């Protein structure tokens, strides 16, 4: 993601949801956000996709916890989620996707 700029039109193809509906999906702007995070531009990344930045943050923290456990010789446990957590994440993504296309959530749009 650092070397291939998703800000260039068509660099990674197109979002089928955006193409069909004209509205951004919850993932729209995620590639741009990750690209900006690799460049250290956190505020711009949050502006591209707040949800993607949050997910990358959770992933980095989980990886650091795993790495710390391995370094201390403890058994490495992987991040596992219950059905309730997965459902909550799905609902959060749906709310995020709906909020970013409403006037009061326009600041979340990519």
Image: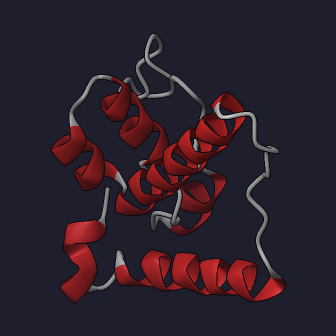
Q: In percent of the image, x 59 and y 49: which residue is there? A: 15
Examine the image and state in which quarter residue 34 appears: top left
Quarter of the image that includes the C terminus: bottom left
Question: In the visual, does 77 lie left or right of 3?
Answer: right
Q: Nearer the viewer, residue 27 or 85?
A: 85
Q: Nearer the viewer, residue 1 or 82?
A: 82
Q: Judge whether 5 appears above or below 105 on screen.
A: above
Instruction: State the scheme by which the image is colored.
Output: secondary structure
Examine the image and state in which quarter residue 108 appears: bottom left
- Residue 70 position, x and y percent, is 71, 34
Q: In percent of the image, x 39 and y 29: which residue is there? A: 35
Q: Judge whether 72 appears above or below 3 on screen.
A: below
Q: How many marks?
A: 0
Q: Nearer the viewer, residue 66 or 81?
A: 66
- Residue 105 position, x and y percent, is 25, 81
- Residue 28 position, x and y percent, is 47, 54
Q: Judge whether 88 appears above or below 110 on screen.
A: below
Question: In the visual, does 6 lie left or right of 91?
Answer: left
- Residue 48 position, x and y percent, is 31, 50
Q: Nearer the viewer, residue 29 or 65?
A: 65
Q: In percent of the image, x 69 and y 81: which residue is there? A: 85
């Amino acid at each position: 993601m650092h070397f291939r700029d998703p800000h260039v039109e068509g660099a990674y193809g197109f979002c089928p949801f955006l193409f069909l509906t004209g509205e951004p999906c919850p993932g729209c702007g995620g590639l741009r956000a990750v690209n900006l995070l690799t460049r250290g531009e956190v505020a711009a990344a949050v502006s591209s996709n707040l949800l993607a930045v949050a997910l990358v943050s959770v992933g980095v923290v989980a990886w650091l916890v795993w790495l710390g456990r391995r370094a201390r010789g403890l058994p490495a446990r992987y991040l596992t989620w219950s059905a309730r957590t997965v459902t909550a994440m799905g609902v959060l993504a749906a709310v995020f996707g709906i909020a970013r296309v409403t006037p009061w959530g326009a600041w979340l749009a990519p």
